[in-house]
Amino acid sequence: MKLALIKKTHLGMAAALFSLAFSTAAHADRLADIKARGTLICATLTSSEPVGFVDPQTRQVVGFDVDMCAGVARELGVKLEQKGVSVEARIPELTLGRVDLVVAALGYTKERAQQIDFSSIHYQTPIKLVAHADGPFNKIEDIAEKRISANKGSTPELYARRQFPKATILTFQDSPAAFLALAQNKVQALAISQPSGVRFVNEGSGKYKFLEGALYFEPTGMGIKKGEPALLAAVNEALEKMEKAGEIDKNWNKWFGPGTKYNIVREKKLTPVSAFE
């Protein structure tokens, strides 16, 4: 009787463990959770024009990344729930499960790819240095041992440190604060992606310029929490459909292309992330 009871207890424990494992695995399927919830929680920046910023008239967050979030949500058959995020909080918010997808000027790096998964790369832009137009600097190499500002936790910070190890890098919470450091002569240059930097150059009334050269030509994708293969596959499928339909080009031209103050051509099309690994 005792042996039979022990066997029965063991079988019950095994069944409970199997049920718990199955339940945990099911819960880990973020794509299923998104569809059951009916919304995609997509994180974007909120103070970086034109990827994600507050429209002064509507007070809504708009931009290229917001439109890309909306396109992916539509392809998944759910509504978009946009969530603002700072540059340094992009990866923590994702790994903690507070958002489903990060579409916030998220440049691919091998270091980041150890923490999160990346979708296919949907655009590539150069990381540039902005300096005073009347200053003595013309090429990025001229800043090699100077003071450079950048967003904290951004790829411009990363590549400024890599390319110019003797430079002093000052980091700030957002692009306007990093630019203010340049305007106040606290630094000699601002490290920033070209699309984001165009705003400061164009609105500077000739006071600022891009230095010749680039710190890096940055591939940018969407961030997905590791261990979510179904969601990753679904996001990549959505991007492929949007590329074939011309939707990514349409979004790009709306925010970056000819007719905008940025006037940047999207030369690089959707590319598998494996090309950069």
Image (cartoon, rainbow, N blue to C red):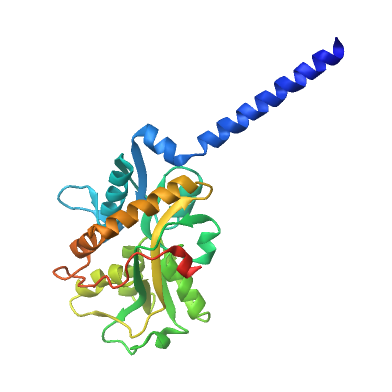
Please tell me which residue lies in front, 176 or 210. Answer: 210
User: Is residue 158 visible in this depiction of the protein?
Assistant: yes
* Position of 61 relative to 168 (above/below): above
Total numbered circles: 0
Please tell me which residue lies in front, 167 or 23. Answer: 23
Question: Which of the image's four quarters has the N terminus?
Answer: top right
In this view, the residue farthest toward the right is 2
* Position of 134 relative to 85 (above/below): below
Where's residue 255, x and y in %?
21, 62
Please tell me which residue lies in front, 134 or 69. Answer: 69
> Residue 184, located in which quarter of the rendered image?
bottom left
* Position of 68 relative to 161 (above/below): above
In this view, the residue farthest toward the top is 1
User: Is residue 184 visible in this depiction of the protein?
Assistant: no
Is 16 on the left or on the right of 133, as rendered? right
* Position of 224 relative to 258 (above/below): above
Where's residue 215, x and y in %?
41, 78
Where's residue 146, x and y in %?
44, 82
Q: Residue at x 52, y 39 (%)?
A: 28
Where's residue 210, x and y in %?
30, 80
Is 111 on the left or on the right of 197, as rendered? right
